[in-house]
Amino acid sequence: MAESENDKERSVRQALESSLVAGESLLAYASGTQSMLLKSKPCHLGLTESRLIIILPDQQSQAANPSVSIRREKIKSVSVRGGWSRYNRLEVKTVKDGLNLSVSGGWKKRAKALARLVKEQPPTVSAGQVVTPESLLQEAQDFQTLGMIASAQVSLKQATNMNPAIGMDPSAEKLKTQLAEMRLAMRVGTGFLFGNLGVIFLLSVCVVVGSQSLANFLDLATLWTIGISVYFGVNLWMGKNEQRMNTVGAVILGYVFTALSALGSGNFIGLVTGVGFAGSIALVLTGNSSRTRTWIAIGIYAIGYLGVLTLTILIVFVAAILNAGGGG
């Protein structure tokens, strides 16, 4: 495997080999990046007979063991798909979620070799790799590190089913709480996005009923909002943690479109509701998830977005009735 390596490939291989245990060998390796908003995080993958080793270099200083792993029994598929640019997408899928990386240059070939070996060579388990409640708990913690929330919840449940007492372990209790709060935050974020779709639908109905042009209502900012609400709403509901920051970035960009459109038309209500919507999304999806942050985000969404919209619609409706009565 050391043949035909450049310096970077050799460095990645050596880092992965340092995480091997006795009797384990590195069959294939690759490296890619996770795209998170405006930055990309490096990620190295190493395939052995029994597991996929993952190293997140930027976390090495924060953990005693810089590598995490996924048992090959947990992996549904590994594939490399072409993209519209010079990058390919390396997908590692489990039953519940997955890990997506961008690979380019010489890493494409190594990624494809790794994916092929996963398919062609069945996993083997050594006598020292028996699954225990403790190993399942560690597996759940590894999944959480990778942002694979749904898989982490499955492994944690398996650990407590195997040994209910492990559920009372402080680390297991802490992990369970963190996973539940992260999943709740993403579900609430989905609710915000889909709620926004409902608002757009109701407003479009009002435009049609008012005999106004729907084409003027569906401007670039509104079409962008519809697109990101559908795409990111589905991804968040599926528990794709890596899409949290991407959602925030897309919503903020959408607010820039909305703000420019609102300023151009003198629609200052649109500026206020845009802040309420973007602010609630940013609060619930950034930082460490907690019930407090989630409830504050719900309050901002309910008052600063839905509340202001509802009040505006009521004022317009009442004014229309009064004008109709005065005209009669």
Image: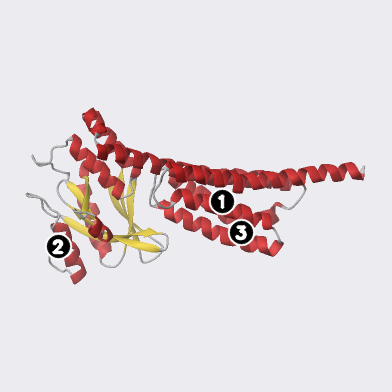
Q: Which quarter of the figure is the N terminus placed in? A: bottom left
Q: Nearer the viewer, residue 219 or 253?
A: 253
Identify the residue position indicated by label 2 in the image. 14
The amino acid beneath tag 3 is Thr
Q: Position of residue 30 (x, y in %)?
A: 23, 59
Res 169 → quadrant:
top left
Asked which secondary structure carries label 3, the reply is helix
Viewer-side label of 3, 2? 3
Query: Which of 182 and 42 lies nearest the eye of the viewer?
Result: 182
Instruction: Using the rendered view, name the quadrant where residue 60 is placed.
Output: bottom left
Above/below status of 283 relative to 3 = above
- Residue at image point 22% right, 48% down: 119
Tag 1 secondary structure: helix
- Give the labeled residue for mark 1: 277
Q: Mark 3 = which residue?
A: 258
Residue 69 in the image, given as x and y percentages of width and height: 22, 48
- Image quadrant holding the C terminus, namely top right
Q: Regarding mark 2 in the picture, which secondary structure is present there?
A: helix
**Residue at screen point 53% across, 46% down:** 193
Amino acid carrying label 1: it is Phe
Q: Judge whether 278 appears above or below 94 on screen.
A: below
Viewer-proximal residue, 189 or 232?
Answer: 189
Q: CA distance from mark 3 to mark 2?
A: 49 Å
Q: CA distance from mark 2 to mark 1?
A: 47 Å
